[in-house]
Image (tube, helix red, strand yellow):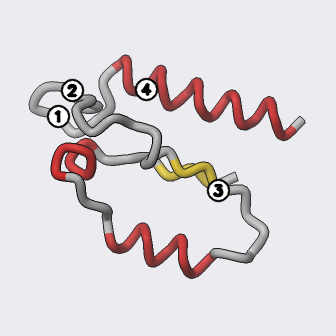
Amino acid sequence: MMVVLPADWELRHGVREPATDRLLTAVQGDGLDILDLRTPVQPDRVLRLPNDNHYNPAAADWAAAQIAARLREMR
């Protein structure tokens, strides 16, 4: 499984990372299970720690829950 996590700046500025989109296009049709978490996040949601681009605890919990749910579905 491949997981695509949104960067905080992608959501705040409403843009997509072009390199990520090119990668997803390149592997499309290869049979990979891709969990793209960029879509379901509200643009006003803050994912990062203050003064740091790492996920804050709430964002890490959200991502972990999404990944765990997909893994449960795969069983």
Position of 23 relative to 37 (above/below): below
Spatial distance from mark 3 to mark 4, Cα to Cα? 18 Å
Q: Mark 4 points at which residue?
A: 60
The three-letter code of the residue at mark 3 reads: Ile
Mark 3 touches mark 1? (CB < 8 Å): no
Provide the secondary structure element on which disc 3 rests.
strand
User: Of tags 2 and 3, which is closer to the observer?
Assistant: 3
* Residue found at x 38% / y 47%: 6
Quadrant the C terminus occupies = top right
Q: Nearer the viewer, residue 67 or 43?
A: 43
Spatial distance from mark 1 to mark 2, Cα to Cα? 5 Å
The three-letter code of the residue at mark 2 reads: Leu
* Residue found at x 26% / y 52%: 10
User: Of tags 3 and 4, which is closer to the observer?
Assistant: 3
* Residue found at x 61% / y 49%: 35
Q: Mark 1 points at which residue?
A: 52
Q: Which of marks 3 and 4 is nearer the N terminus?
A: 3
Q: Could you tell whether 15 is left or right of 61 in the image?
A: left
Q: Which of marks 1 and 4 is nearer the N terminus?
A: 1
Position of 68 relative to 35 (above/below): above
Location of residue 63 in the rendering, given as x and y in whole percent from the top left corner: 50, 31
Q: Which of marks 3 and 1 is nearer the N terminus?
A: 3
Q: Name the residue under label 3.
A: 34
